[in-house]
Image: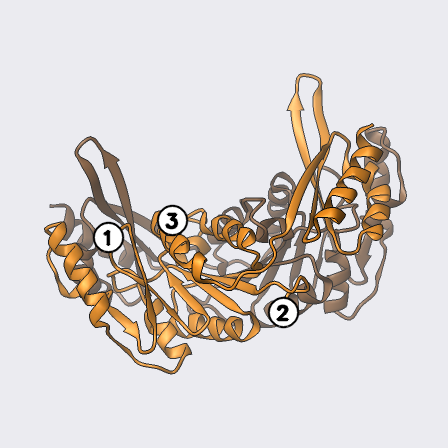
Chain colours: A orange, B brown
Amino acid sequence: MVSNTGNPSAAFLVIGDEVLSGRTQDMNVAFIAKSLSEKGVDLMEVRIVPDVVPTIASALNDLRNKFDLVFTSGGIGPTHDDITADAVAEAFSTKLVVNSEAKALIEARAKAQSLELNEARLRMARIPVGAKLINNSVSGAPGFNIGNVYVMAGVPKIFRAMVSEVIPGLPSGKPQLSRTITINRPEGEIAHELGRIAKKWPSVSIGSYPFFKNNASGTTYGSNVVVRGQDEESVIKAEKQIKEFFLN
Amino acid sequence: MVSNTGNPSAAFLVIGDEVLSGRTQDMNVAFIAKSLSEKGVDLMEVRIVPDVVPTIASALNDLRNKFDLVFTSGGIGPTHDDITADAVAEAFSTKLVVNSEAKALIEARAKAQSLELNEARLRMARIPVGAKLINNSVSGAPGFNIGNVYVMAGVPKIFRAMVSEVIPGLPSGKPQLSRTITINRPEGEIAHELGRIAKKWPSVSIGSYPFFKNNASGTTYGSNVVVRGQDEESVIKAEKQIKEFFLN
């Protein structure tokens, strides 16, 4: 799927029983969304799936065929429930083998930290054939890139470090400029005119997000209007028109 | 798709450019995940898609065919970018019409709050033919239920109120009991034995989630082990075995 901005398109696949059970509040979506947005890559879908090999493989195949780039988080640690590498190998019909480079990284880390180099830690060196490693500056065990898929850790600190490693090498597009206008009136009162302005700027996306504020005199209702687009001039003109109409 | 627990299965579809752009941190996934978990409904997939009618309709058709229940959030307000009802009508090949009951609710709310009853507010009375309304105790404009799909607002306060309205009427299953054991050792050191215990309890899911703590003496690494299952006896026995092995 090509984004209508001409930018590379992307999907993010979160692998995590802990997110689907509500135990863990996901923090990775917002981070990668912002990072891709700054790079001019359009994040067009996020999926969260459980820790089940065929489910992950099927979602991955669906997304990697639909979008230019796919990122995953979660399931690449040393425990029995870390099965993302198995699922990626299955999706790509390739083998999962001990990668000597990954093994060397894990060995070096174990040595530096005086950790035992056991079977569980070496499990993290199992990488699908044909993949390139993604450096893990936090805890050693690498992520990997195969085809258009980037496989990263779920722990937010490690995920962020890996995203930062990956971003410079991605194809880039033209970032969207985004401006937010806060209007202290409820959406129902600004909707008509806002819709009229939106029609005038087809190259710009205008979103409206209501908010409530509770204060001494009761609840006040307002709207955050977000103007986004690649053409700076249009974004600024649309913003100006909205401000002139609603804030004067 | 039937969950292997025998519980009803569910998917959650988040409709939101603002989440995909990283502007808004989603808070609804964790809320509905917990609510469904308590009800004995297994949340098996979450998707986040942009505010695009055919994209929403296609995701909705995919999910409603795959799972017993589908919940959506976002895009049912009064502004031009609120197009979820249009997408749901398209997915169900039905018409979007002004629903007299929804209109009455919006009229009553406008009257009570001395708000103008304009075209934008009445836009929220457009409901697909065949749908039943979901009460909105926060701001009046209703959500709706059609087939196995429940369409709700994206603003967390309204979303939560609507989820609470919907939950009692859902088919229910046997909730999973969940126990968390915090082990102050890194995953790489507990993985072998944890995997052995997990194999002994096939009816129980055992997940391991690493954590880091920074303190005066440096970083300590630990693991939160989560034991989940429907059979209370097995969960408690597996928990006991993990505690005995790692905490004594």
Horizontal and vertical percent position of residue B235: 29, 56
**Which one is in front in this view, the residue at disc 3 or the one at disc 1?**
3
Q: Position of residue A194 (x, y in %)?
A: 82, 43
Answer whether labels 3 and 1 touch (C-beta < 8 Å): no
The residue under the point 13% across, 51% down is: A112
Q: Residue A163 sits in which quadrant?
A: bottom left
Label 2 amino acid? Val
* Mark 2 burial class by Cα count in 10 Å: few <14, some 14-19, many 20+: some
The residue lying furthest to the bottom in this view is A93
Parent chain of label 2: A
As measured in the structure, the alpha-carbon distance from the residue carrying label 3 to the one carrying label 1 is: 27 Å
Judge depth for marks 2 and 1 and give the one in front: 2
Q: Looking at the image, which is closer to me, B168 or B127?
A: B127
Q: Quarter holding the C terminus of chain A?
A: top right
Residue B239 got which mark? 1
Q: Which residue is mark 3?
A: A156
